[in-house]
Amino acid sequence: MSTSDRPQSSPAFRDHFSDHAQDYSRFRPTYPPALFDWIAGLVPHTTRVWDCATGNGQAALALAERFSEVIATDASAEQLSSAPPHPNLRYEQRHATESGLAERSVGLVTVAQALHWFDPDPFHRELRRVLAPGGVVVAWCYELFSVDEAFDRPMLQLYHEILKDDWPPQRRHIETGYRDFPWPFERMDVPTFEMVSEWNLDQTLGYLRTWSAVQRWQAREGSDPLTLVEPQLRMNWGDVDRRPVRWPLRLLASRI
């Protein structure tokens, strides 16, 4: 893994996840292979790919199985330390607006569950700089998961009521599926995808504890906000060991 000799982040960068990078890696849902098959159909397999804000490298690894060269960058050294290796994949510690890539050197840029954290205008300039003519950018996000109506009810109470003051303002872009995110490029028509994980209750609760708003509550209150709803969550889960947990994906794509 190579790192930049620049500072780990720009002054505008706020790291919401490094304090629990290992948990973030353990409890994140996985993206469907069909998503990456669709992305791979947009450009040749020999295309050089930049996976921006790669986090723990989940999307980068799937891309490396379909493309011959993937450069995956993230501002967080802690997140990169959890990223898996692959012969087609190179990790670098870089900020989204300072990729270190040469001009017009990549044909595809991907951003998984991170676009809403970026300062839009500087990132748009970096996209225009590094993308080759006709290059493609694909960003996606997922919001709240769903199990069933009974389980979802206390989970939504946690999200909307207990943690309502602890979500950063950028979260609204996930809630709208990037529909209102500032985007100066023509948007492509995109298909619909869904993530599905077969999780037990402990995995599901572990995922809830990775929410940045949960971490912020804990830092302020010195307690775990899940204790306010966990008894109801456990009761509503029922006696089933594993259950399907579903997240709808929302995509934003452009050919520039």
Image: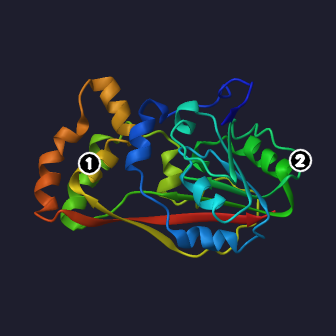
Which one is in front, 235 or 76?
76
Which one is in front, 105 or 161?
105
| Vertical side of 169 occupied by 77: above or below | above
**In contact (CB < 8 Å): disc 1 and disc 2:** no
Quadrant location of the C terminus? bottom right
Which label's residue is closer to the chain start, 1 or 2?
A: 2
Which one is in front, 42 or 117?
42
Left or right: 109, with 28 as reference point: right
Pointer 1: what residue? 205
Whole-percent x, y for residue 145 in the image? 36, 60
Q: How is the image coloured?
A: rainbow
Whole-percent x, y for residue 45 in the image? 75, 68
Could you say which disc has been placed on residue 103 in the image?
A: 2
| Vertical side of 147 occupied by 23: above or below | above
Local packing at callout 1 (Cα closer than 10 Å; few below 14, some 14-19, many 20+) is some
Q: CA distance from mark 1 to mark 2?
A: 44 Å
